[in-house]
Amino acid sequence: MDRLDRLTQRLLEDLDRRTHLPSDRCLELGLLEHFARGSLGRVDRERVESHLGNCLACRDRFVELRDHLRGIAAPGPVAPRLASTLDTLVGREPRERFWTHVAEALRRASVFKVPVWAAAGMAALVLITWVGAHKFQRPDATIEWPVDFSSPGKLTPTNRQMSRTVSGVVSSLRDATTDGIEAHVVSLKDSSGATYVLFAWGQPMVHLGDSVEAEGIFTSATENAGLPVYQGVAIQLRRVR
Amino acid sequence: MNVTNARLFCSCLSDSRHRRARFAGTLLDLVNRCRVRDSDAWRALLGPFQEVRRRALRSFRLPEADSDDILSDALTVLYAGGLGQFRGGTLAELIAFLKAVVRNRAIDFLKARKKWAPTDSPAEGRAEESVALQVGRDPFDAVSGIADDECVEFLRQEVAKLKQEKQALFLMKARGIKEREIVEQTGRPPGTISSQIARLLDRLRASLRERGCVR
């Protein structure tokens, strides 16, 4: 601030003091307002113009008043801080606080918080369900067999994975060792004449002519001379005394 | 009436005398409604009040945040019953009232920060408190050797010699009105205003230099 600025500031202060202590000759504020708004008659207007030409204090008041009138005639947007203060005064929630709440609610909605224990429980439930479904799964479709098992026959398997136990006399034994893996095929004939051809691992534990019970999984069936022949894998063979 | 409506009314100010008078009446009516705690009226009053604040605090040269603090403080004072003390009946008196409230709050604000330098006159009351200078007052300029009081009087004489248009131009500039706003108020081209202000200040500086007030 140079000295001219400082002197100007002092001059304005002096004018302000005179404004607040107007002399009898100075113009009333209301008259200046009407002059600024152009609502004075010719006589009053000329009187005001004449005075303003000689009184720097009134000229200053007029300049300031005209500036204020123009300002309040076209006010700018209200500062958020001021609006917020008024909201607080009138007892309403401030608008900016409202929008803050909305933003906070959106933020919360977008962040789905799950406790660790809940996540672990969910994972365990999924695992148990999956294991249970596979463990206790029951196939619902029937197996398509190459022959019609509705014809008289002792064995009518409904599930290739379900074992059956049959009884009979060992009619043949044949080694089936392959690539060093010991195995054999045993044939049984039951009392009805049906033949069971079973593949079994290891060395044969039964002999020709033994009466045995065989638990096996039967996978196919054919006929030989009008008698059924069932083929499968032996799970267990034991002699019957 | 909301703020938008108030602005619409305000925009009519320059249209016609009839509408200007209507606007003044509307604003005074708004004040009456504010006195009975009409919240919509208060909201409509905020815009004009803010404009008064902007002009009243120009010479304080405060940061915007401080001005906002002062304005919020002044609003609280007015809402708490301060507006009820307004007894005037004209728009000019309302402006002067609001201006005094804002300036008094600003002076309190600066006093609290110990940045306010009181004016010389011991007789002036609170309402007459003038611009709060944020710089120390130097009653005697050591460089020029001429006292400030004497130089202020020189400046007054020089300004008084100016034509009315130039006087108004000097006062508008001194009051901190932006050149853009001066252009709007005077209706002269921007370039003309800038050059006129520059020549005016050069002329005043030269006159004061002759009297030994500036170097």
Image (cartoon, rainbow, N blue to C red):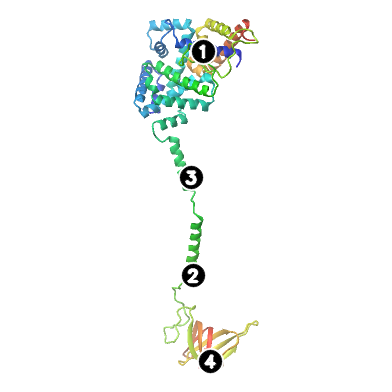
- To the question of a shared chain for discs 3 and 4, the answer is yes
CA distance for labels 1 and 3: 54 Å
Return the x and y of residue A234 as percentages of the image width and height.
53, 84
Tell me if I can see residue B7 in this picture.
Answer: no
How many numbered marks does the figure carry?
A: 4
Furthest residue in direction front, as rendered: B122
Tell which circle, 1 or 3, labels the residue nearer the N-terminal end.
1
| Residue corresponding to mark 2 | A134
Return the x and y of residue B28 as percentages of the image width and height.
36, 20
**In what quadrant of the picture does the N terminus of chain A appear?**
top right
- To the question of a shared chain for discs 2 and 3, the answer is yes
| Residue at left offset 46%, top offset 39% | A100
| Residue corresponding to mark 3 | A107
Q: Nearer the viewer, residue A89 or B174?
A: A89
Residue B74, above or below B168: below
Disc 4 marks a residue whose amino acid type is Val
Disc 2 marks a residue whose amino acid type is His
Residue B51, above or below A100: above
Disc 1 marks a residue whose amino acid type is Glu
Residue A91 vs residue A11: left or right?
Answer: left
Return the x and y of residue A181 as percentages of the image width and height.
63, 82
The part of the image, by quadrant, that contains residue B154 is top right
Residue A13's mark?
Answer: 1
Tell which circle, 3 or 4, labels the residue nearer the N-terminal end.
3
